[in-house]
Amino acid sequence: LSMRASKRESATDKVSDEGTDKTVKDDAVHLRRSIGLLPSISFIIGTVVGSGIFIAPKGVLMNSGSVGLSLLVWALCGVLSTFGALCYAELGTSFRKSGGHYTYLLETLGPLPAFLQLWIEFIFIRPAVATYVSLAFGQYVVEPLFMPCVAPTALVKIVSMLGVTFVAAVNCWSVTLAARTQVLLTFIKMFALILIIIPGIMALVNGKTENFRNAFDSDSLSLTKLPLAFYSGLYAYGGWFYLNFITEEVINPNRTIPLAIVFSMVTVTVFYVLINVAYYTIMTANELLMSDAVAVTFASRALQGVAPAIPVLVALSCLGTLNGGFFSSPRMLFVGAREGHLPAIFSMIHIRRQTPLPAVLCLYPVVIIMMVRGEIFQLINFASFSRWLFIALATLGMIIHRYRFPDHPRPFKVPLAVVVIFTIVCFFIVGLSLYSDPWNTGGSCALTLSGVPVYYLTVKKSYIPERWKKAFNYLSLHLQIFLEVTQQEVQTY
């Protein structure tokens, strides 16, 4: 490891946009550019399309109050998410580092907002989202075995833990294996969506329209609940930003990132609206609200011949979202450690596997611990506040950066109106959510602000006792030896 370190210090090579520079030795330790257009599309679609479209319809309908308004919410969430994805396409081609939200906040608004985003992302947001998806995975695996009875909660959690363990192992083992797994699972989940859409649309064409009569009539519509409907819908679209977490590993990012984002978001928006139309064609609003597994209930009515396969397909869809999250999110932790905001051990990669092993392993136990507790819809509301707050801050920072540095290279540039609309809508939803759900969103805000003293005590000016530093350095050194990890030997941005 010491030889590796000295070798890294003398290395001055960079990795080109098109691939690994041939002047760099093949055995040099670094994250390689190996993600092409198809894997990029698979990472976006495969991460966006997960448990949300199979669970969130209940949350959207519950808080919107009517079938018609819920479909409008789904369409608007798609448009809003596409606007955000276009903004991130510009950010991803303007700033060539991996790290997503963290990197863009660091480059545009400074270290404190970036640290707070990193803080809340890894102590709550990422574990909460992974917990949500993994519990959905466990639910769709276990529930069919016990129908019509309620599936045992303990068994659902055990199966969920097995899913998380599998995904973590794949991402620790190989970047190529994780990418190929993502492509495969994306094709499976798109097949599942088509399998649900076709019978619903066929029934609608054949005249089954009674569930759409008086679609906008509702006595339960409340403006205070409407932001929560958008949160559920936006959660189902969540994941459009994950490709920006791995910018340094994308081949020719100036071309690949915008193409992948535009194609993926248009595809997902069309599919999401169609699948909700299919749900409402076969099921009434009350039946959808009573179902904890909407896709399974739908399949038992419209796809009786292949109904047993639907839960399996949905579970694999959830697994794809988990895999995409575990592939991309640790890169933010990796970059944060590289910038000095986290312990250096998390910026290291395995000397043979070329994977960010410590960052992946850091995320795994937090997800397992959070899985033991938490109600699924509360997790959405709790996590969404901070996530959308920092996305809004990132696009606000993008506007400020445009003004301050007009000559900065921007290979892909979004119309200013799109950026402004997206930023205003995000801040509006975040602000209104404090009024709609003050306990969850207030708690999320407090948890985010708890990172301020941590930043000033440990990053801005370290007040950590020397004895603690020596103990941590000793532990870090032995972890580095045990895990066989070291710093990158070439600059990849």
Image: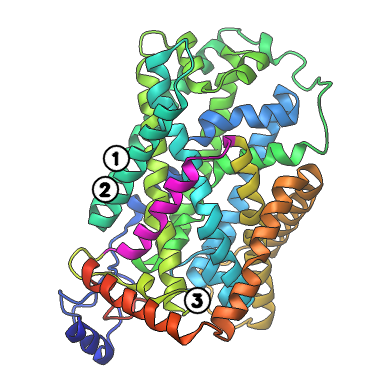
Looking at marks 2 and 3 on the same chain, the residue that comes earlier in the sequence is marked by 2
Camera-nearest residue between 224 and 440: 440
Residue 219 location (% of width, % of height) = 84, 21
Q: Residue 313's quadrant in the figure?
A: top left
The answer for how far apart the CA atoms under marks 1 and 2 are is 6 Å
Quick one: which residue is furthest to the front in this view? 467
Q: Is there any visible trace of residue 254 in the rendered image?
A: no
Please name the residue shown 47% across and 33% down the image: 136
Type of amino acid under label 2: Arg
Looking at marks 1 and 3 on the same chain, the residue that comes earlier in the sequence is marked by 1
The answer for how far apart the CA atoms under marks 2 and 3 are is 32 Å
Q: Is 381 inside the magenta-drawn segment? A: no
Q: In screen coordinates, is 27 left or right of 123?
A: left
Secondary element at tag 3: loop
Residue 394 location (% of width, % of height) = 62, 66
The quadrant of the picture occupied by the N terminus is: bottom left
Position above or below: 482 against 328: below
- The residue that disc 3 covers is 341
Q: Are marks 1 and 2 in contact (CB under 8 Å)?
A: yes
The answer for how far apart the CA atoms under marks 1 and 3 are is 35 Å
Q: Residue 282's quadrant in the figure?
A: top right
How many labels, in total?
Answer: 3
Type of amino acid under label 3: His
- The residue that disc 2 covers is 180
Type of amino acid under label 1: Leu
How many residues crowd mark 2 within 10 Å: few (<14), some (14–19), many (20+)?
Answer: some
Q: Is 357 inside the magenta-drawn segment? A: yes
Residue span colored magenta:
355-376
Secondary element at tag 1: helix
Residue 93 location (% of width, % of height) = 48, 69
- The residue that disc 1 covers is 184
